[in-house]
Image (cartoon, rainbow, N blue to C red):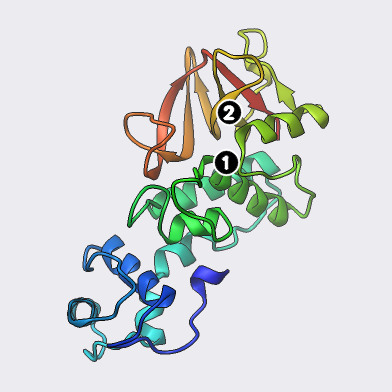
Amino acid sequence: MEELKFANEIKRKDRGKKVKRIQEWLSLQGAGPAPDSDFGPATETSVKRYQRKKGLPITGVVDKATFDLLVAPMQAAVKPIAPDGKSVGKLVVAYARQHLKQHPREIGGPNSGPWVRLYMNGLEGAGAPWCAGFACFVLKQAADTAGVAMPIVPSFGVDALAVSAKDRDRFIKGSSQNRRKVRPGALFLSAKDVPNDWSHVGIFVSASGESFTSIEGNTNDEGSFEGFEVCTRIRGWDKKDFIRI
């Protein structure tokens, strides 16, 4: 995974994407300047403060030991889970919770930062909403762990996920009669008022009467489909369709 690769030491006067990534991780951990891809005095000071906090040699140079600590949250999120006979759906929920624990979120602008690039295969920016990227990344982890093929064709587009689910007879139309068919690890789709059009996707965790619990990316505490983090939400069943996993 590109976001977790360490190529060489990064230091004062360096420029480019590798510097931006360090600045992003410093900011995500509360110790960094604004990401501008320029390793200047502010970045060097931030690195030294981070190294002091973590008990590392205070050099101001990002060596492998410093880098590994900076990206440790992502390493923890992608760590393989023992299958232990779990279904793909249960593994989806387990991986989603593992990501949630590390609080993935944007940094440096809408749909930007290392977490977004992880879920979007390197893409980021205004044209890269990442709710589907997050859901498919977690689903792929679960499928790989279970040793099975992906149940749907992965996509960064919510509508494309629905089409794939229909093609593979995994689409569950939202209705009170169909709720019993929805199992943990299913994907929920937020339907628009226009037929065959959906705005958001997340992971169904559990049901509770007239609502259900989800874990989803590109959302926030207000439930926006254009949010900035991975979080858990309580959703109503209204205008929700599902993809059976």
Look at the numbered disc 2 and give the secondary structure of its residue.
strand
Q: For mark 1, does the 10 Å Cα neighbourhood hold few (<14), some (14 to 19), or many (20 or more) residues?
A: many
Q: Amino acid at mark 1?
A: Ala
Front residue of 148/39: it is 39
Question: According to the image, label 1 marks what residue?
Answer: 132
Q: Along the polypeptide, which appears first: circle 2 or circle 1?
A: 1
**16 lies above or below 245:** below
- Pointer 2: residues within 10 angstroms few (<14), some, or many (20+)? many
Quarter of the image with the N terminus is bottom right
Q: Residue at x 41, y 86 (%)?
A: 64
40 vs 120, nearest the viewer: 40
The answer for how far apart the CA atoms under marks 2 and 1 are is: 11 Å
Residue 120, relative to residue 79: is it above or below?
above
Q: Residue at x 65, y 39 (%)?
A: 89
Judge by depth and name the residue closer to the eye, 61 or 85.
61
Q: Nearer the viewer, residue 100 or 228?
A: 228
**Residue 220 on image: x %, y %:** 35, 36
Q: Amino acid at mark 2?
A: Phe
Q: Is residue 5 left or right of residue 106?
A: right
Q: Quadrant of the C terminus?
A: top right
Question: Which labelled disc corresponds to residue 188?
Answer: 2
